[in-house]
Image (cartoon, grey):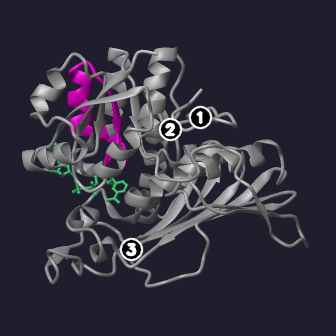
Amino acid sequence: MERVGIGVIGCGYISAAYLKAAKLFPILEVRALADLNHEAAEARAQEFGLKAVSIEKLLADPKIEIVVNLTIPKAHVEVSLKAIEAGKHVHSEKPLGVALAEAKKLIELAQKRKLRVGCAPDTFLGGAHQTCRKLIDEGRIGTPVAGAAFFMCPGHERWHPNPDFYYEQGAGPMLDMGPYYVTALVDLLGPVARVAGVATMLRKERVITSEPRRGETIPVKTPTHIAGTMEFVSGAAVTIAMSFDVPKHKHTPLEIYGTKGSLIVPDPNYFDGRIEIAAAGEEWAEVATEHGYADGNYRMIGAADMAQAIRAGRPHRANGDLAYHVLEVMEAFEKSSNSGAFVEIDSRPERPAPLPVGLKTGELD
Ligand SMILES: NC(=O)c1ccc[n+]([C@@H]2O[C@H](COP(=O)([O-])OP(=O)(O)OC[C@H]3O[C@@H](n4cnc5c(N)ncnc54)[C@H](O)[C@@H]3O)[C@@H](O)[C@H]2O)c1
């Protein structure tokens, strides 16, 4: 199959994981790297034996078919729109945008130009999550009736070198970590129908404790604790809490409760993890992961699946409709908190097709 040329825009912290994983997918050929800060692109280019160019040059390269957008959240739509306007498909880091209105423009323009939009997270394509999907689809826990999703930590200023963006408007724990949880849930249970939430911001500033900016104070412009309930179209009700305000806790990341049993779903920020299942009155039993992509960090699999889908003429899995729905759901928690009412969710994406069992690394079909 003819390889698909990739251009990466945004060469910060997470780009290393993508560039490492890109080597595992024979369908991908990373042709160029670019960044607003050219030194960042140069540094990654040297590290990975690639070429750093200007953003304009990358967008003008006819051999680049997909732009992988790894910029900061508030630049996602601006950069993705530039890619679409240049006639490229785009796969963006999460979230798709920092507001539903800007994400809508992107989806509409891509549709008009007949180009594809993809978005992280792609961890739901990992072996552990695909096995959970199979268990649910095969009825192993009966009909899912409820669930619980928790990401709660003391804040990213403890480890990220430039944590400012996590506390800007349109960021916070829901837009940062919510995509992993809500995407995994939509993959497992289908779309969300309505949302109720409470969003709080008790601290107005945070002190960086990571290097090199230890001791600097950053302002907080977004809620840092968001809790709520999602009612799925299927009728399942899932409790969620995403927080940068919790020193420590003991909840598991994701659990699904069905009419016949309960399922412990591994952390949706990773590709692997321990799956457990139990019926009422039984002990928890571990379930072995059946699918590939369960033994490492495969960030880039979403873009590789898009590349393969372009050549095969099939839909790609980590797609814009799914990411748009996830953004609509995430935004709804704060809206509900402000209004004191449920927020109805309009978008209704299809569940992405599951990955087959038995794929080797690098294969997607
Ligand atoms: N850090 C992580 O562990 C992690 C994990 C998963 C996903 N992500 C997501 O990846 C994205 C990037 O995160 P990061 O941690 O790598 O951030 P970062 O700040 O380390 O890197 C972002 C890079 O994007 C560049 N950039 C910003 N605006 C730009 C623009 N308009 N055009 C071109 N380049 C631009 C910056 O110069 C910087 O080099 C975010 O959306 C984040 O949510 C991060």
- What residue sits 48% from the left and 44% below the top? 122
Q: Residues within 10 Å of mark 1 (few under 14, many from 20)?
A: some
Which residue ends up furthest to the right in the rendered image?
281
Q: Residues within 10 Å of mark 2 (few under 14, many from 20)?
A: many
**On the picture, is 21 further left or further right than 73?**
right
Instruction: Please report whichever mark, 3 or 2, sits nearer to the chain's N-terminal start.
Output: 3
On screen, residue 191 above or below 151: above
Give the residue type that dot 2 points to. Leu
Residue 29 shows up from this direction: yes
Whether the residues at callouts 1 and 2 have beta carbons within 8 Å, the answer is yes
Locate residue 113: give its quadrant. top left
Label 3 residue SS = loop
Residue 14 location (% of width, % of height): 31, 53
Whether the residues at callouts 3 and 1 have beta carbons within 8 Å, the answer is no
Label 2 residue SS = helix
* Alpha carbon separation for disc pair 1 and 2: 8 Å
Per the image, the residue denoted by label 3 is 244
On screen, residue 57 above or below 326: above
Residue 322 bears which disc, if any? 2
